[in-house]
Amino acid sequence: MHATIHRIACRLAVTPADVAQWYAHDAIAGLDGLTAEELVACGRGGEVVHFLLGVLASEGIDACAVGPPARVATTCASAHDREAPRGRRARSASP
């Protein structure tokens, strides 16, 4: 779920650092004021995906396009690899 959320968020953010900052530190008011990371940790990742798809739609960004925009595709993918090694799970405790 973490990887899916990061891929969708990359469609909205300028840099992978922006995505990482949002994911770990920005509360989502409409989702009980929790961060995406906290929501994923408590099994509510689907709600984060739904939230992001709603933001994409409101911004007029094609949610069906595969991957992030070309300008950030490579950097978002490599940032995700550094931040979430395979097999590592989010710990329990917002573009």
Image (tube, grey):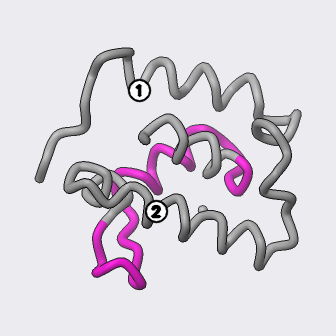
Q: Residues within 10 Å of mark 1 (few under 14, many from 20)?
A: few
Q: Where is residue 73 in the image (x, y as percent from the top left)?
A: 77, 30
Q: Name the residue under label 1.
A: 83
Which amino acid does the dot numbered 1 rest on? Answer: Glu
Q: Which of label 2 and label 1 is nearer to you?
A: 2
Magenta segment range?
11-34
Assign the N terminus to one quadrant of the image.
top left
In the drawing, does residue 44 fall left or right of residue 16?
Answer: left
Instruction: Identify the residue position indicated by label 2 in the image.
Output: 48
Mark 2 touches mark 1? (CB < 8 Å):
no
- Seen in the image, is 43 located left or right of residue 52? left
Query: Element at badge 2?
Result: helix
State yes or no: residue 31 in magenta.
yes
Q: In this view, does 29 lie above or below 22?
A: below
**Splitting the image into 4 quarters, where does residue 15 fall?**
top right
Residue 53: image location, x then y, percent: 65, 65
In space, the residues marked 2 and 1 are separated at their CA atoms by 18 Å
Q: Mark 2 or 1 closer to N-term? A: 2
Q: Quadrant of the image for the C terminus?
A: bottom right
- Which quadrant of the view contains residue 82? top left
Nearer to us in this view, 26 or 29:
29
- Is residue 58 something one can see in this rendering? yes
Q: Position of residue 12 (x, y in %)?
A: 71, 57
